[in-house]
Amino acid sequence: MTNLSQLSIALVGCGKMGGAMLRGWREAGLRDVEIFDPHPLSEEFKDLGRHESLSDFSSLASHMDMLVLAVKPQVMKEVCKQLAPGLPEDLPVLSIAAGQGISSFQGYFSAGQPVIRAMPNTPAAIGKGITVACPSAGVTAGQKDIAERLLSAVGEVLWTANEGDMDAVTAVSGSGPAYVFYFMEALAKAGEAAGLEADFAMKLARRTVIGSAALADFESAVPAATLRENVTSPGGTTQAALEILMDGTFQDSLDKAVQAATKRSKELSG
């Protein structure tokens, strides 16, 4: 696998996700990175060079191994428009923006531009993310290896050859942490309704979610349904609760939520 210390990377956008990736790269040994962001960098990145303007990109592009785009979907078109004149046709582009399809980038840049569309999630900020990546037809094995190395610095990486999967991926794992946090909120509120103090209930809910996720990770070969059944004694308290949760409405709401997020991802890709 490619050694990060040997790479030269251009990072456009150093917000929450871009910053999380940069943090992981540095810990993995990456030193040669050019950052393009109009906003001041956080204190931990002060030793790195920052370019306020994308106009500097063309003079640096020729020695870059990959261009990483970590800006919001709403500004992506304008950013790509500014990058296009100085972008070599063989320089691979790695995008982590939601709802931006490969064809969009090959429209902004050259038709044969090697593009990797990726969808990480916010646990990448602590190296616990999951990223799904999809390469365009022109991506070489070497370019895919570079992307794998960059993305694996912030968590696990899965690949799909079917770009049609990416909207659902965005809805499940990209947006998924928000669903988990909402469940945590809801569980804490339910604890309050049962008579617990708010802070106490939230502590219980938070640690229960964290511990359950850690157990699921530790017992990764065990199906989630089996882990659930292991907690559920016949006629016990857990069964009483699950009879309410598993009446169909919870699954139906989650289905609708994922469908709504998938639909929105498709709309963003235009």
Image: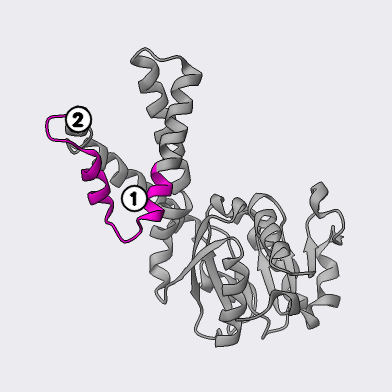
Q: Foreground mark, 2 or 1?
A: 2
Q: Is the residue marked by circle 1 packed among few (<14), some (14-19), or many (20+) residues within 10 Å?
A: some
Q: CA distance from mark 2 to mark 1?
A: 23 Å
Part of the protein shown in magenta:
212-240
Total numbered labels: 2
Q: In the drawing, what numbered circle is on residue 244?
A: 2
State whether the magenta stretch is mostly helix, strand or loop. Answer: helix
Q: Residue at x 39, y 35 (%)?
A: 183
| Residue 68 on the magenta span | no
Residue 255: x, y in percent? 29, 47
Determine the residue positioned at 74% across, 69% down.
30
Q: Position of residue 258 (x, y in %)?
A: 36, 49
Classify 13 as above or below 158: above
In the image, taking residue 212 as reference, residue 148 lies left or right, namely: right
Residue 227 falls inside the magenta stretch:
yes
Residue 88, relative to residue 186: is it above or below?
below
Q: Quick one: SS at disc 2? A: helix
Q: Residue at x 12, y 35 (%)?
A: 234
Give the residue pinned by disc 1: 259
Q: Amino acid at mark 2?
A: Ile
Which of the 4 quarters of the picture holds residue 25? bottom right
Left or right placement of residue 197 versus residue 236 in this view:
right
Of the numbered discs 2 and 1, the one sitting upstream in the chain is 2
Q: Secondary structure at mark 1?
A: helix
Q: Is residue 130 left or right of residue 228?
A: right
49 vs 264, left or right, is right
- Tag 1: amino acid: Gln
Q: Are marks 2 and 1 in contact (CB under 8 Å)?
A: no
Residue 130 position in % (x across, y down)? 49, 59
Whether residue 142 is visible here, answered yes or no, is yes
Measured from the top left, where is residue 102 in percent x and y?
A: 52, 72
